[in-house]
Amino acid sequence: MSTIKKIGIIGAGQMGSGIAHVCAQAGYEVVISDISPEILQKSVAAISKNMDRQVQKGKLTEADKTAAIARISTGSDLSVFHDADLVVEAATENEALKREIFKKLVPNLKPEALIATNTSSISITRLAASTDRPSKFMGMHFMNPVPVMQLVELIRGIATDEATFNAISELTANIGKTAAVAEDFPAFIVNRILLPMINEAVYTLYEGVGGVHAIDTALKLGANHPMGPLELADFIGLDTCLAVMQVLYEGLADSKYRPCPLLVKYVEAGWVGRKVGRGFYDYSKNPPVPTR
């Protein structure tokens, strides 16, 4: 922890909360910022609840949990990052929004502070260009749920310097994660492979090749996947899946990445998955049942 001691997190949703969780547990001071005080309160409560599960499973002591929560602070203004050594942006997967956040963020940072983005698909080089420090900017793509998933994709922009890469690599190891280094191409490694598979599963449903349950069962039992592709899409969020496919389609100009019209329709309907109670499954039922 020689170069990074205090970490800022922009966004108190599931990803931002998860990143805060693992960083605080690893001994870093953490400050989370979001526009809503209520969301910030829910974030800290969720982190505490998830750490309670770790205590119950013997993976964390009660004393360590108390100390980790004490290292987390919150604020609704970007000025809370004035003394942060690193700020990780974990906002919605929308390039215009992220660029606007970075423009507002940089006046609040000390000159030596690093910036990382948790984007799952957007060009690191383009996002870095919206800041005053492209050399101190890189991608740090965590997997969901962050406390459980081992991988972090590390992506350098064209201007990222070696010191920044080394500092972020060290942080990744210190929080107990394994790094996979990816080049700055649309969707990087994981989503470049995973999202077209999910999109193809939606096409399989759209074309009537199989129903929701049949498609998920086929991949779970036939390919030994722990979760079917449509169930996984609901877990990720269909809006996020669509955003990644649009980045791939526009960035690589290849028709094989065209988002399935059914995926577009579900997102337009607001049926974006587990977080709203409906996607390819209806989560108001127990157990959830397919909606088609």
Image (cartoon, rainbow, N blue to C red):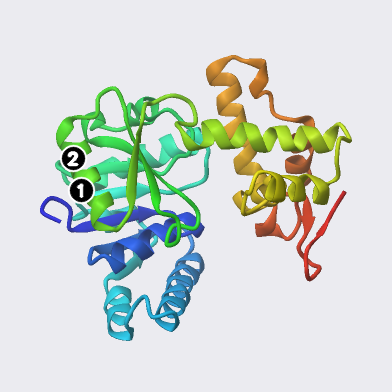
Query: Please, what secondary structure does the residue beneath circle 2 have?
Result: helix
Q: Secondary structure at mark 1?
A: helix
Residue under pointer 2: 166
One can see residue 87 in this view: yes
Q: Residue at x 25, y 47 (%)?
A: 108
Q: Nearer the viewer, residue 131 or 56?
A: 56
Indicate the quadrant where residue 59 lies.
bottom left
Query: Is the C-beta separation of discs 2 and 1 under 8 Å?
Result: yes
Instruction: Decide: is 65 above or below 4.
Output: below
Give the crowd class for mark 2: few <14, some 14-19, many >=20 residues within 10 Å. few
Report if residue 34 is visible in the image.
no
User: How far apart in space, not on screen, are marks 2 and 1 (Cα)?
Assistant: 6 Å
Question: Which residue: 40% across, 53% down?
Answer: 150
Q: Position of residue 50 (x, y in %)?
A: 46, 73
Mark 1: give few (<14), some (14-19) or many (20+) Cα within 10 Å: some
Quadrant of the image for the N terminus? bottom left
- Residue drawn at x 66%, y 38% is 198
Q: Is residue 192 left or right of residue 131?
A: right
At which x and y percent is residue 278?
76, 56
Foreground residue, 69 or 147? 147
Q: Which residue corresponds to mark 1? A: 170
- At horizontal 80% and vertical 34% (from top left) the residue drawn is 204
Number of numbered markers: 2
Residue type marked 2: Asn
Residue type indicated by callout 1: Glu
Q: Nearer the viewer, residue 114 or 222?
A: 222
Q: Residue 282 appears at what percent x and percent y?
A: 80, 59
Residue toward you, 209 or 15 = 209
Q: Is residue 3 above or below residue 184?
A: below
Q: Left or right: where does residue 279 sit relative to residue 138?
A: right
* Quarter occupied by residue 261: top right
